Image: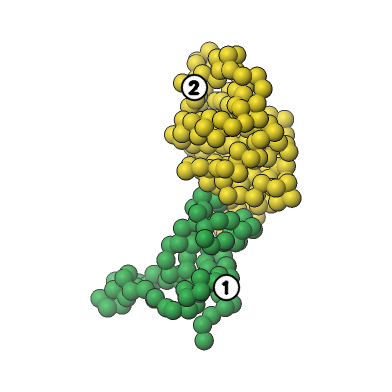
Amino acid sequence: MSDLNNMTAAESAATKAAIMNQVPGSEIEGQSPLHHADFASLAQQGPKTGGIHLREHKLLGHLTLRCNAENAEQLAAVERVLGVALPLQPLSSVESGNYSIRWMSPDEWLILVPGLETFEIETKFRDAMPGHYSLVNSSGGSTVLELSGDNAVTLLQKATSVDLHLNSFPVGKVVSTLFAKSTATIRRIDEQRFELVIRRSFSDYIWLWIQDASLEYGLVIEA
Amino acid sequence: MLHIYCPHCAEYREEDEFHCAGQAHISRPLDPEACSDEEWGEYLFFRKNPRGLHHELWVHAAGCRKFFNMTRDTQSYEIKEVYKIGEQPSVVAE
């Protein structure tokens, strides 16, 4: 892969890529794709024990970064902005404080940050990144679910063909794969805890699907 | 069901995650204007349909969304090798 555009960070920043603060303040109410499911009430009224625990991490900042993994200057710039280096190993992820980065493809990473910090981080990237790269705020396009519990693995086995055994799916591994009839980016946070980045438009389908698939284990909603 | 090794993800995945995008190694004529109708037609429409080894272009559609090449036996469905775009196959028909 070659860098068509060899601009320095200052030259890149001077091109003034149009970015907008999508969430200017916490006083503006944001509705997650699963707003209609009302997890807050379900968490209060629903069952407190069961094999599957489900939580939505809503309104996070999703940043899709595409750059050249062989460009040391870009890698250094990412590390300056986020305080942590991009995971270059296929299917790996790193986490540092509130920031987490997932390897999506050899030149693409998904960075999750707290929703209100998104604009600040985007701005920092625009100032720091040299050369040819792309940073897109895709926060509105997806949401994050956290599946945990004794039966989390069994439930996922019904949805995806990926091997979930700890030997081939260790903690920290990330795979983009099929989930039921939709797609998801699945990351193992813990032995029994998984994080799913799912498409906004499929969130209701996946929510219904998880309810159905967890009937035999019992579903506990957390909020 | 084929069990396909993605050279970018560096692991085997189920066929569901992939799409076949047809014959590999088709290069666009450098100067389309200079092509005869026959040459252009060959490039645009005519594809190999061998019994035996075939080089195909595949995409890991539900995974890393990258394209790669595969040498496959169309008779036995056996996958001989996968290799990245820009590389040449090491298994070729005689």
The residue lying toward the viewer, choosing from A114 and B32, is: A114
The disc at residue B80 is 1
- Quick one: which residue is furthest to the left in this view? B37
Can residue A23 be seen? yes
Q: Residue at x 65, y 40 (%)?
A: A153
The residue lying toward the viewer, choosing from A197 and B4, is: B4
Q: Chain of mark 1?
A: B
User: What is the letter of the green chain?
Assistant: B
Can residue A113 be seen? no
Secondary structure at badge 2 equals helix
Query: Quadrant where the N terminus of chain A lies?
Result: bottom right
Q: Residue at x 61, y 27 (%)?
A: A218
The x, y position of residue B82, in whole percent, is: 57, 67
Scheme of colours in the image:
by chain
Chain A: drawing colour: yellow
Secondary structure at badge 1 equals strand
The residue lying toward the viewer, choosing from A50 and B56, is: A50
Tell me where residue A114 sits by quadrant: top right
